[in-house]
Image (cartoon, grey):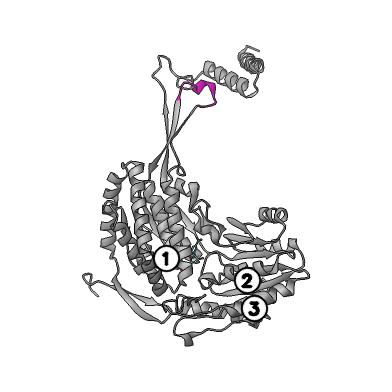
């Protein structure tokens, strides 16, 4: 291949392994050009009034509403996501984000303030929030629309330009995102898309971006952080999860089983916040709850989500053969070490794509890989525990800490447990939904990364928090300016002690003692 030849990326439908598109990979020189153009676009876009930026968000919202069916179809083809899930977890969160931004008063606003130290009382101080620059977003394939779009909307509302490097497994969807923004009056080159896989991502993550927002696996997150460090680019890392669900003995059987089954299997378990570990505190109804989970799992329908006569498909395929192998080997490892399969446990490539049966395992323990590594597939491992403390200890015994859920009728107790479980988000009697809410900060600790997407706190990542302090010119030098000497030391000490002891006499007495000590030191002996 010569440097003039274009490389292409084949886009696959994981439900039937057929190629649904072939698109050019962005070359390194094109990436450089895109970055330069985005920088130029930012330089004029940043001065746009906030209300004008919100107009672009309003226009995007209209485009999104008009195109939602088409987007849902595309997500079904490229990712294999069931259509209901696309409406709820891809389209709706972006519409919510549009509304949250359009409301206008959720983002950081300029404010003035006075300083507490009396010697600084003449100053008028202000904090303003300025657009930051060109923001890079590297996104995963599992929520191929909502993850990048929610980040793009936030960044643009705050006056930044964006370059998106989507997953190579969701590139057609990314081009659709670009098309939607192009159909608005957003100025050219404010939103840009770079197409490619890991090689493209590695090059992209070394650009002198204003911030790099990465969502993906912990191993790639570490590479991203190293690459970004070469230019001291600040990073946000939204990484994997191994979310525990703690079920107390009083949890009502039907809604708990329904919630847990959905939390384990939605998007075929390919969610960072899927329930990947279930700790059931033993009680009189434990067996009934397990039976219900198994019964509901057996009823789930798996299949090709692009078949329009099959709108009741609950689970689509896994994304690729590598995922299928990983999930199967984790299940086999657990079974070989003594876990018992209650339902599922088999690949279903006979259905034409990368399908895996929704699977429930019991008799698992923390020595098994299935309780340590991210499964990212439709497997629900259940562990019975004797008491609550054991459940909390096990929930915290993980390299990950993204979300956790607690299931019980006892809200007070659930809140106490929430304070003891290490995670970024805790939900009581539900799971996963928080990602869809722009008001809720989203992110984790440990191998789940750092930084928060969504909410006011994420907005702070996309701005330069600038402080301006204004003083009128004075006839006198400030007391902390040069020259230093005994006088400045006495003033400094008296002032500080008087202020912080809240007692001028003590302050002055202490300074007098200091003067005496100095005098004694220099007196002839
Ligand atoms: P991934 O880490 O394989 O890829 C993520 C992105 O990084 C893709 O765009 C990919 O092309 C790019 N990439 C790959 N190698 C790279 C390199 N060397 N340099 C730069 N970029 C590179 O993840 P994935 O398989 O797309 O997504 C699944 C992972 O994402 C899971 O671990 C999941 O838990 C996590 N995830 C986390 C969240 C969250 O909010 N915390 C949300 C969704 C997914």
Which numbered disc, 1 or 3, marks the residue closer to the eye? 3
Q: 138 or 224: nearer the eye?
A: 138
Q: Residue 295 has which mark?
A: 3
Indicate yes or no: mark 3 CB to ligand 1 under 8 Å.
no
Q: Position of residue 164 (x, y in %)?
A: 36, 59
Q: Secondary structure at mark 3?
A: helix
Badge 2 or badge 1: first in the primary sequence? 1
Question: On the rendering, which quadrant does ligand 1 occupy?
Answer: bottom left
Q: Residue at x 25, y 71 (%)?
A: 6
Q: Which residues are magenta?
A: 115-123
Image-quadrant location for residue 274: bottom right
Q: Residue 371 has which mark?
A: 2
* Outermost top residue: 524
Q: Secondary structure at mark 2?
A: helix
Q: 121 or 319: nearer the eye?
A: 319
The answer to whether residue 170 is above or below residue 396 is below
Image side of residue 504 versus residue 111, left or right: right
**Gap between marks 2 and 1, in whole Å?**
27 Å
Which numbered disc, 2 or 3, marks the residue closer to the eye? 3
Residue indicated by mark 1: 144
Q: Position of residue 36 (x, y in %)?
A: 27, 53
Residue 116 magenta-highlighted: yes
Count of numbered badges drawn on the protein: 3
* Quadrant of the image containing the C terminus: top right
**Gap between marks 1 and 3, in whole Å?**
31 Å
Asked if marks 2 and 3 touch (Cβ < 8 Å), the reply is no
* Quadrant of the image containing the N terminus: bottom left
Residue 300 magenta-highlighted: no
Q: Residue at x 71, y 60 (%)?
A: 409
């Amino acid at each position: 291949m010569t440097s003039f030849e274009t490389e292409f990326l084949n886009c696959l439908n994981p439900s039937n392994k057929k190629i649904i598109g072939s698109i050019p990979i962005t070359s390194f020189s094109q990436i450089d050009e895109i970055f330069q153009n985005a920088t130029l676009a930012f330089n004029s876009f940043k001065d746009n009034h906030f209300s004008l930026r919100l107009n672009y968000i309003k226009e995007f919202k209209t485009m999104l509403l008009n195109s939602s069916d088409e987007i849902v179809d595309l997500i079904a083809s490229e990712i294999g996501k069931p259509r209901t899930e696309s409406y709820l977890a891809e389209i709706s969160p972006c519409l919510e984000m549009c509304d949250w931004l359009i409301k206008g008063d959720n983002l950081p606003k300029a404010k003035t303030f006075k300083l507490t130290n009396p010697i600084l009382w003449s100053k008028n101080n202000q904090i303003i929030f300025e657009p930051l620059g060109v923001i890079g977003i590297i996104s995963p394939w599992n929520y191929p629309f909502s993850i990048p779009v929610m980040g793009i909307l936030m960044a643009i509302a705050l006056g930044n330009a964006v370059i998106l490097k989507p997953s190579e497994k969701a590139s057609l969807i990314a081009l659709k995102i670009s098309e939607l923004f192009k159909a608005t009056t957003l100025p050219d080159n404010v939103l840009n898309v770079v197409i490619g896989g890991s090689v493209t991502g590695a090059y992209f993550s070394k650009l002198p971006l204003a911030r790099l927002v990465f969502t993906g696996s912990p191993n790639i997150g570490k590479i991203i952080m190293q690459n970004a460090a070469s230019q001291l680019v600040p990073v946000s890392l939204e990484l994997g999860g191994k979310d525990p669900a703690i079920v107390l003995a009083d949890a009502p059987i039907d809604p708990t089983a329904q919630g847990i089954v959905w939390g384990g299997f939605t998007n075929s378990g390919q969610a960072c916040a899927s329930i990947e570990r279930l700790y059931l505190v033993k009680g009189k109804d434990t067996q009934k709850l397990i039976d219900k989970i198994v019964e509901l799992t057996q009823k789930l329908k798996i299949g090709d989500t692009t078949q329009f006569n099959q709108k009741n498909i609950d689970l689509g395929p896994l994304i690729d053969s590598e995922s299928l192998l990983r999930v199967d080997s984790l299940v086999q490892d657990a079974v070989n070490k003594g876990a018992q399969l209650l339902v599922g446990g088999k690949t279903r490539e006979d259905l034409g794509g990368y399908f895996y049966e929704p699977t429930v395992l019991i008799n698992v323990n923390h020595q098994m890989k299935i309780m340590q590594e991210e499964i990212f597939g439709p497997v629900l491992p259940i562990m019975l525990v004797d008491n609550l403390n054991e459940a909390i200890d096990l929930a915290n015994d993980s390299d990950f800490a993204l979300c956790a859920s607690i299931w019980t009728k006892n809200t007070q107790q659930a809140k106490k447990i929430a304070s003891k479980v290490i995670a970024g988000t805790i939900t009581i009697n539900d799971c996963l939904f928080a990602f869809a809410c722009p008001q809720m900060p989203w992110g984790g600790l440990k191998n789940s990364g750092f930084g928060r997407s969504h909410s006011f706190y994420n907005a702070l990542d996309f701005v330069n928090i600038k402080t301006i302090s204004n003083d009128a010119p004075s006839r006198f030098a400030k007391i902390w300016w040069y020259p230093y000497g005994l006088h400045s030391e006495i003033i400094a000490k008296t002032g500080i002690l008087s202020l912080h002891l809240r007692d001028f006499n003590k302050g002055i007495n202490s300074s007098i003692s200091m003067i005496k000590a100095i005098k004694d030191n220099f007196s002839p002996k």
